[in-house]
């Protein structure tokens, strides 16, 4: 008989994430991170943006990687654990990784993430974060870093229930501290254009695809 272990400290937020992933394939927690951590990450993304540390985002992996400003228009920079705030965030995702593995047996192996800035008018058309098994991303996460965001500012994350669905199920307002998680291969999503600068961190838990013949390249 399989004995379900209780979630540590009765952590409802993480329990709801696991519940959402295992039922509908996505979950949204409006207040997941502490305001102190969110403020530190906000300061960091704005500072790095002023210093021009971001690059135009591309789509696809390796040889297939290309810039395509018809599909997406954001600027990104990989997290590298070079600040205390990044380290705290990466710790949070490590404990979420362990919990998801313990509860859902997904075998999540590692995590990669980037800061993303969408200038006013920027968007990311409907897409899946992984498909055809060519990409080891299994679970996607997005953390929003925008203070005082109102629905009139646009920039929602639109979520569809499955690959061929015509009707979206949810528009997530990208408010500071909100965490969204979804299954990378199953849940189509889109970033609608905003009329303000939009700050976020997107990340992916990955399976290990290293074999004796090929070391899995990190990106
Ligand atoms: C992505 C993405 C969603 C968001 O970077 O792949 O879908 O709300 N981001 O920023
Ligand atoms: Mn995406």
Image (cartoon, helix red, strand yellow):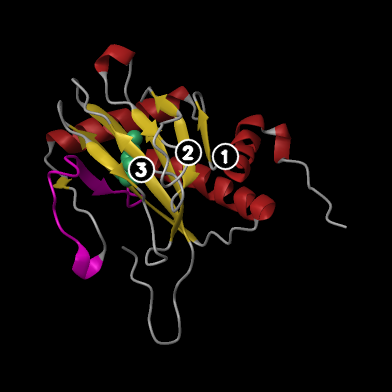
Is there any visible trace of residue 64 in the rendered image? Answer: yes
Q: Position of residue 131 (x, y in %)?
A: 39, 59
Q: Position of residue 37 (x, y in %)?
A: 43, 30
Q: Position of residue 207 (x, y in %)?
A: 49, 64
The residue sitting at the right extreme is 1
Can residue 8 be found in the magenta stretch? Answer: no
Query: Residues in magenta?
Result: 62-82
Identify the residue at horizontal 72%, vertical 33% (top origin): 10
Report the magenta stretch's main SS: loop
Mark 1 or mark 2: which comes first in sequence? 1
Name the residue beneath numbered marker 3.
202
Identify the residue at horizontal 62%, vertical 45% (top origin): 22
In the drawing, does residue 180 fall left or right of residue 64? right
Can residue 72 be found in the magenta stretch? Answer: yes
For ligand 2, which image quadrant applies? top left
Dividing the image into 4 quarters, which one contains the N terminus?
bottom right
How far is the residue under mark 1 from the one under mark 2? 7 Å
How far is the residue under mark 3 from the one under mark 2? 20 Å
Quarter assignment of residue 75: top left
Callouts 1 and 2 close, C-beta under 8 Å = yes
In the drawing, does residue 18 fall left or right of residue 41? right
Mark 3 or mark 1: which comes first in sequence? 1
Q: Is residue 126 above or below residue 170?
A: below
Identify the residue at horizontal 63%, vertical 48% (top origin): 99
Name the residue beneath numbered marker 2.
161
Name the residue beneath numbered marker 1.
24
Q: Position of residue 77 (x, y in %)?
A: 24, 47
Numbered disc 1: secondary structure:
loop
Identify the residue at horizontal 33%, vertical 18% (top origin): 147
Mark 3 or mark 2: which comes first in sequence? 2
How many residues crowd mark 3 within 10 Å: few (<14), some (14–19), many (20+)? many
């Amino acid at each position: 008989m399989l004995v379900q272990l209780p979630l540590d400290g009765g952590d409802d937020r993480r329990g709801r994430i696991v519940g959402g992933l295992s039922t509908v394939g996505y979950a949204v927690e409006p207040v997941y991170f502490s305001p102190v951590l969110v403020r530190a990450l906000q300061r960091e993304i704005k500072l790095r943006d002023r210093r021009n540390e971001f690059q135009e985002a591309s789509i696809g992996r390796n040889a297939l990687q290309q810039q395509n400003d018809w599909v997406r228009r954001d600027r990104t920079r990989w997290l590298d654990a070079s600040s205390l705030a990044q380290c705290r965030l990466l710790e949070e995702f490590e404990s979420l990784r362990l919990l998801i593995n313990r509860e859902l047996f997904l075998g999540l192996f590692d995590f990669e993430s980037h800061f993303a800035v969408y200038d006013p008018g920027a968007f990311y058309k409907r897409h899946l974060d992984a498909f055809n098994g060519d990409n080891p991303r299994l679970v996607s996460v997005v953390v929003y870093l925008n203070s005082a965001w109102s629905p009139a500012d646009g920039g929602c994350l639109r979520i569809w229930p499955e690959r061929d669905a015509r009707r979206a199920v949810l528009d997530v307002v990208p408010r500071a501290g909100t965490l969204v998680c979804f299954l990378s291969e199953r849940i189509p999503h889109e970033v609608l254009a905003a009329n303000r600068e939009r700050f976020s961190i997107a990340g992916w838990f990955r399976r290990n695809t290293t074999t004796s013949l090929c070391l899995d390249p990190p990106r």
